[in-house]
Image (cartoon, grey):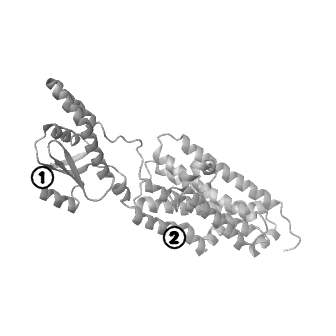
Amino acid sequence: MFLHEMKYYILSMLRNKVLVFWLIAFPIGLGTLFHLAFSGLYDKTTKFSTIPVAIVENSADPVFDTIIDSMCSGDDPMLSSQKVAEDKALKMLESGDIKGIIYNCGTYRTLTVYGSGMDQTILKEFLDQYAAEEKMIKNAVMHDPNSAEKVISIFADEASSCREIPVTHGNTDNFIQYFYNLLAMTALYNALVGLRIAENNSPNMSVLGARKGAAPAKGITNILGSFAGSFILSTLCTCIAVSFIHFILGVDFGKRLPLVYLSAIVGGMLGISMGFMVGVLGKGGLRLKNGIVMSVCMMSCFISGLMLGEMKAFIAKFAPWFNSINPASLISDSFYCLNIYGDYRRFITKMASMLIMSAVFTLIGFIMSRRKSYASI
């Protein structure tokens, strides 16, 4: 009876076009839109890379030339410079081949940029710092000419000490959080599958439930069979979503992809148990409970940052405890922990929280379903 219930529960869910849409088609469609919107945006707006500049030299300045050479040296230099005439530099700036033009007039330097951004800001800060420290070098040379080379060398070492040191070997693209939350939403939408467990086994919610209630088979067997079927279906859908986003869209989830699948599967379990609990609570019909489940899932994902990336940080500032019980935040944070942190302590904490919540929701659902009795069906 258990295997029979599991088999036909899966078949009935696969025939449900609404469930197929929310669990498979929707994450694929929205994931594709996210990819089109955010692809390459991190590299253009946030990620640091060598800044190309042009030097228009109106007067010889060996000290400045030494500093520029130090900034352009190394495996990951801050600048990439070339000395050109002013008219050529302006053409390069207009075409986007360089980020700025530095005019070296010997006693002072000016900067010309086109537009604004991180690269332009770095160039301005560099010239401001150089102007402030140039006086120190000139004063040292004036009082002790023999110390000129030493002072210039110290300044060059300070300038070249600004280098990229990765704090993690994972994907630091801040826009990946939208894909984390998309997978969290996909996992939570398995609450619709859990809601169908309650519908198919509650005599007051469906004709099928009434037939099962009058059948000699034990109700616990039917529910467990439905749970097994829903878990298989949930695993299939979440794995399709993760595989599509990672392999087709090319989103980098880090080097622990098997655990990303595991997190999505456990998140699906959390969604199933939540939907089952909502289904057996109260006396409302399927339409009402379906609306409740969708509202809870959407609100949970909104707070987690699916629609507004800064929302989770806002909640963490004013109510940090809420992110620890918000299902969508727990699921998305488990992906984040796998990608960013080197150890598994935070990841295990998130997984344990999801498993505990799933167990509590399931237990409440079983207790409430067994306490119900009907005078007539």
User: Image check: 316 left or right of 41?
Assistant: right
Q: Which residue is mark 2?
A: 25
Which residue is at a point 48% across and 59% down the rendered structure image? 178
Q: Nearer the viewer, residue 108 or 114?
A: 108
Element at badge 2?
helix
| Residue at 45% in and 61% down | 245
Along the line of sight, which residue is nearer the eye, 49 or 31? 49
| Circle 2: residue type | Ala
Residue 73 position within the rendered picture, expressed as x and y whole percent measured from the top left? 21, 40
| One can see residue 210 in this view | yes
**Type of the residue with mark 1:** Val
> Residue beneath label 1, please?
84
Element type at mark 1: loop
Residue 198: name its quadrant: bottom right
x and y percentages locating residue 32 in the rendered image: 44, 67
Q: CA distance from mark 1 to mark 2?
A: 54 Å
Neighbourhood count class around disc 2 (C-alpha, 10 Å): few under 14, some 14–19, many 20 upward? some
**Quarter where residue 147 is shown:** top left
Question: Could you say which is closer to the camera, residue 61 or residue 233?
Answer: 61
| Left or right of residue 195: residue 216 | right
Above or below for 316 versus 4: above
Quarter of the image with the C terminus in it: bottom right
Q: Residue at x 22, y 54 (%)?
A: 112
